[in-house]
Amino acid sequence: MTGLVLAPLGFVLPGLLLWYAGQRLARGRRDADTRGALVGGLATIVVPVGGLLLLGYAAAPVLVGLGAGLLLLAAWPGLVMVLLLGRRWWLCRRPVDVDRRAVIVLGAPVPDGRVGEELAARLRGGLTALGRLTTLGGLGAATSPLVLTGGRAKGDRPAESEAMARWVRSQDPAAPLLLEDRATTTEENLLLSTRLLQDQGCPPPYAVVTSAYHAARTSLLIARHRLPVQVVGVRVPMDFPAGAYLRELLIVLKEARRPHLVAGLLIVGGAVLTGFLAR
């Protein structure tokens, strides 16, 4: 019974890795990322399969306990993924609160200096959120700026915020813009943008618009730094949806790797100890 409940979660991580590898292979991309995802998927699938086999065929209580521990360990990333997806669903259906005093749009790579489809979707979401504040007359709605955050990539490529500003002005020349052109990570996007707004005399609370798949991790960063910011997720076109969600899951696991490692050791150790005591 335990195996039937935990098995689906146990196959989430290897399933995402193999799905991502399959997407890339279907598009003829046989590079290091594809090979890494393929090898990682085949390697991680051993854990839930081994747990199921031990639960189904082992007779010794210690081995049964080990099987349960392996299955619990394999299910952990799946549980995290389920929580992230639940958070994403909520952040995408909730409109911007009318008490927000500014809207921040997170940047995305602009390798050729032009805004791509995903970034354009974020910017449309930002303009929609700003329009809602203006229409409903929230606090400071008349002067609420649209903050475009994203720094300069390597080489002579323009800062993401500059490309974003050109796109917004082509859609709404009257939009009140504020550019943050130093951030190179999501964490820097949030910290530098909120600091810029406060330096400009625009007090919190704020809203931040980002891609749906990225919204849950963004909300975790906001909670970590205790920022007065509401996350608004918008659906965006993606070439590799499996890769996007896999990347978010792996980053969340990596950023809190010590707690996850401790949890894994406790799960396996506790299950084996339970089996040993049950002999």
Image (tube, grey):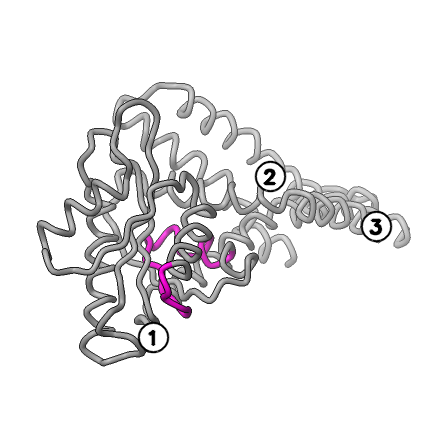
Residue receiving disc 1: 97
Query: Mark 2 to mark 3: distance in Å?
Result: 19 Å
Q: Give the total of numbered labels.
A: 3
Q: In the depicted view, which residue is nearer to us: 128 or 8?
A: 128
Q: Which mark is residue 275?
A: 3
Residue that extends furthest to the bottom in the rendered view of this protein: 137
Please name whichever residue, 145 or 190, is drawn nearer the observer in this view of the structure.
Answer: 145
Q: Earlier in the sequence, mark 3 or mark 1?
A: 1
Residue at (33, 34) in percent of width and height? 152
Mark 2 = which residue? 49
Image quarter (top left, top right, bottom left or bottom right) of the N terminus: bottom right
- Please name the amino acid that badge 1 sits on: Asp
Q: Give x and y (percent) for residue 253.
A: 57, 45
Cα distance in 3D space between marks 2 and 1: 46 Å
| Residue 53 x %, y % | 66, 40
Q: Residues within 10 Å of mark 2 (few under 14, many from 20)?
A: some
Q: Badge 3 local density, few (<14 within 10 Å), some, or many (20+)?
A: many
